[in-house]
Image (tube, rainbow, N blue to C red):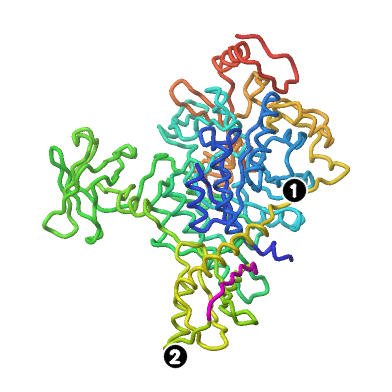
Amino acid sequence: MSLLNHQLELLAPARDADIGIEAINHGADAVYIGGPGFGARASAGNDLRDIERLCRHAHRYGSRIFITLNTILRDDELEPARRMAWDVWNAGADVLIVQDMGLLEIDLPPIQLHASTQTDIRTVEKARFLQDAGFSQMVLARELTLAQIREIHGALDAERCKLEFFIHGALCVAYSGQCFISHAHTGRSANRGDCSQACRLPYHVVDGQGRFIAHDKHVLSMKDNNQSANLAALVDAGVRSFKIEGRYKDMGYVKNITAHYRRLFDQLIEDREGSDDPLARASSGRTTFTFTPDPDQNFNREFTDYFVNGRQDDIGAFDTPKNPGQAIGWVTRVGADWIELECSNAAAVLHNGDGLCYYDLHKELVGVAINRAEPLATLGQWRVFPKDPVAGMRDLRKGTEINRNRDMSWVRMLEKKSSDRRIGVWAVLGETADGFSLTLTLTDEDGHVGAAAAAHPRQPAREPARNEAGLREQLGRFGATIFEPLDIQVRLAQPWFVPASVLNHLRREAVDRLEAARLAAYRRPARGTPVEPPVPYPDDTLTYLANVFNQKAHDFYRRHGVQVIDAAYESHEEEGDVSLMITKHCVRWSMSLCPKQAKGVIGVKGTVKAEPLQLVNGKEKLTLRFDCKPCEMHVVGRMKTSVKNQRARELAEVPMTFYRTRPQPTRA
């Protein structure tokens, strides 16, 4: 196995360049970020100057920058997307993350391509096809088990294609790229970066006889992903890039979660030192932190490891899609404009601006934002004055358990400098053969060298015994640079006196040349070469689920042997009820109504059927159908007339072209 296949890549998100820079500073080996357009987070774009600034900072450490170009595109958008791809390449970007196969049919720069999670990679056949089509890395479906990941890894060429997997953050309940509810109900397409998040809404669940199975529950809302306990197993299964979700998240989230996983991976790498299967990080430097990372401090819906270790009973955040926080105590008294609390940890401190919350009698989360917090005489007891009227806080009474979901001391701590990332160097102070100049040579942990020389008259040191220690101390002051000394050697003919100004000059010059050497040696990853002649796609027929939205994508699949190619759902050719979401999550399983759960249960076996259920939210109704063989759930519905009419108006106002298999219907 090559050295590259031992490298573990921690891949962090960035909403903007400043957050991306802090992700690098907190230990990320790579950062993914939106470019000027066409990313799967519509409001998370960045201009080229910021992309260039981020790339320049990342490349100092050998970290890479991935640009998300992972939406499906209309025909009239392909040329702007092509220009953007060249622009981000010229700005220094390393990778494009791609969903739309039409992009492989146009003139892209020689940039490495990664297959987005939106390409829905769940099978060996799909993964092998994408590898052979020229993708060098692919983001696997979040729903895969360790065994499935291992099987896919075993079928690929590790020298050509690496596996990437989400290890933290929000979970889309649908297989990525297989959710159309947002477009059907609002005209906003998840596959075009504008999801309305229907999965976070409350629903009634009703059976075929009209009986309520659940009332106002968020039955499509998942807990947040957390694979902290599974990293070693994922490495052993073949994953080499570990992705944190969160391109909409704030600076504090990215700092904290990146630091959390940096520590875990550093420990894993250290544990494997000297083994038959050693590991290494995919970029340079060592990162230290001024805080102890804690994923519980950031917004989360509680955590799950989803399907990595098989189907679990408790993956849903059905009571609320909000952040329930951590239990901190309980209510002791309620006043007209204040609440008194007793903290379970007497040493706990409440702050002005903290966020508290509790569950009311209907299991709905109620927020309590603290305007002012005052300690009482008894340790651990507090009186808090909320920003909102206490009278409006339903079901708040003595004994109510209180959680904290925002700790202002934590927030303020992460607003400050909170990490230091340094590349180790070996420093040698010497002199030229003629003895007229001093030299300083810096060699970094990757073998790059920066050297400087300065003429200096030889003058014996007044205190030879202390001279070398003084030289070492002065040379070791790397201050605001990205380097730290691993070892400093002094190789002088005799203890010469060297002024601090000369040593500082040598160090600055050597550091500048070392940084220049690192930059000159940096190589962006190579573009994968597609197999020729083109390999056949695993199927010869594609439905709307393949998301073909432009003629170039059609041409790509036709070139790979597909005979029947339906248009994307966004082309408005699916007029009746269709699967608007396909998901591994099963409402029947979660509510103990699955026929498989009834197997072997006396008196129950054979009585539980996988009959359809209905989701109701106001006037919105969706049907749940259950495909028990692959253990999947389909959320079935149809496109609203208002959405069809909206498209007709758009076509009349703005010229746009997209792939169709039949003429566009007239306005309803």
The numbered mark at residue 30 is: none
Q: Residue furthest bottom?
A: 465
Q: Residue furthest right?
A: 533
Q: Residue at x 20, y 34 (%)?
A: 389
Q: Residue at x 52, y 27 (%)?
A: 208
Q: Secondary structure at mark 2?
A: helix
Give the magenta part as a residue range: 447-457
Q: Residue at x 75, y 58 (%)?
A: 159
Provide the residue designation for mark 1. 527
Q: Earlier in the sequence, mark 1 or mark 2?
A: 2
Please state which of the two labelled residues, at mark 1 or mark 2, is closer to the viewer: 2
Tell me, yes or no, if residue 182 can be seen here: yes
* Horizontal and vertical percent position of residue 47: 55, 37
Marks 1 and 2, Cα distance to the nearest angstrom? 57 Å
Tell me, yes or no, if residue 310 can be seen here: no
The numbered mark at residue 465 is: 2
Say few, some or many: other residues with alpha carbon within 10 Å of mark 2 (under 14 / 14 to 19 / 20 or more): few
Q: Report whether 66 appears left or right of 379.
A: right
Amino acid of disc 1: Arg
Say few, some or many: other residues with alpha carbon within 10 Å of mark 1 (under 14 / 14 to 19 / 20 or more): some
Q: Name the quadrant of the C terminus.
A: top right
Q: Secondary structure at mark 1?
A: loop
Q: Residue at x 38, y 44 (%)?
A: 323
Q: Main secondary structure of the magenta part?
A: strand
Dots 1, 2 in contact, CB < 8 A: no
Please say whether residue 187 is one of the residues in the magenta stretch: no
